[in-house]
Amino acid sequence: MPSEIVTDLRGDNNNAFGQLYKEHFGMVKRFITNNHGRADDAEDIFQDTMLVLFEKLRQDNFELSASIKTYIMAISKNLWLKKLRTANREIELTAMHSNQFFDEIDSAINEEKSYRDKLQNYLNKITDHCRGLIHDMFFKEKTIEQIQKDHGYSTKHNAQNQKHKCIEQIRKVREQEEKKEI
């Protein structure tokens, strides 16, 4: 995250929060609506996430150890899962401020970073063509039609077949890596 955004957030700059909303609310909303929630639940969770982030940024010893996207997603996931565990009762603000809550967030961030590191390792071991296709499809969230056009596939079906082959490359690399760990 650029240092100017951190500075803006620490300085109560509403534009910085607006920028975070514009860039990251969609992923939080997708997660929540895919996990038994509604759009208004996503709004509530995102607002609570911003409160937690704001509180963390106000701590003198806080150091952002992951991307802001990862951090926002980890906080949101923890808040939502906690809400689901409490049978959809409101999360008490005191629970959001406990050390255990922040430990859970840090743990989720470390798991996300570990997952990202593993994924990057897998991506580095597949063909350049597949790495580009996977990046466009899953990181840039391009449609299959856009992939077809950008990569020059004659049909949508060909693009989908190539996507499948590239995912298979990653699966094989992952299996080889897991065998090495055993």
Image (cartoon, grey):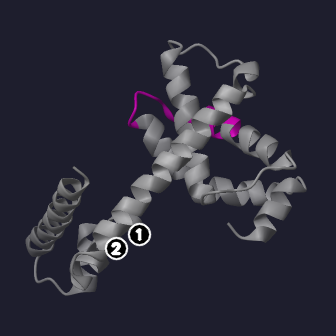
Across and down, in percent, residue 137 comes to 31, 68
When the figure is inspected, residue 41 is found, relative to residue 94, above or below; the finding is below
Residue 77 lies left or right of residue 144; in this view the side is right
Residue 71 lies left or right of residue 152; in this view the side is right
Residue range of the region highlighted in magenta in the rendering? 34-48
Q: Residue at x 16, y 68 (%)?
A: 169
Q: Residue at x 15, y 73 (%)?
A: 159
Across and down, in percent, residue 70 comes to 55, 53
The label number, if any, that marks residue 136 in the structure image: 2
Q: Residue at x 52, y 51 (%)?
A: 26
Label 1 secondary element: loop
Mark 2: amino acid:
Asp
Label 2 secondary element: helix
Q: Decide if residue 165 is in sight here.
A: yes
Q: Residue at x 85, y 45 (%)?
A: 59
What residue sits right under mark 1 in the picture? 140
Q: Residues within 10 Å of mark 1 (few under 14, many from 20)?
A: few
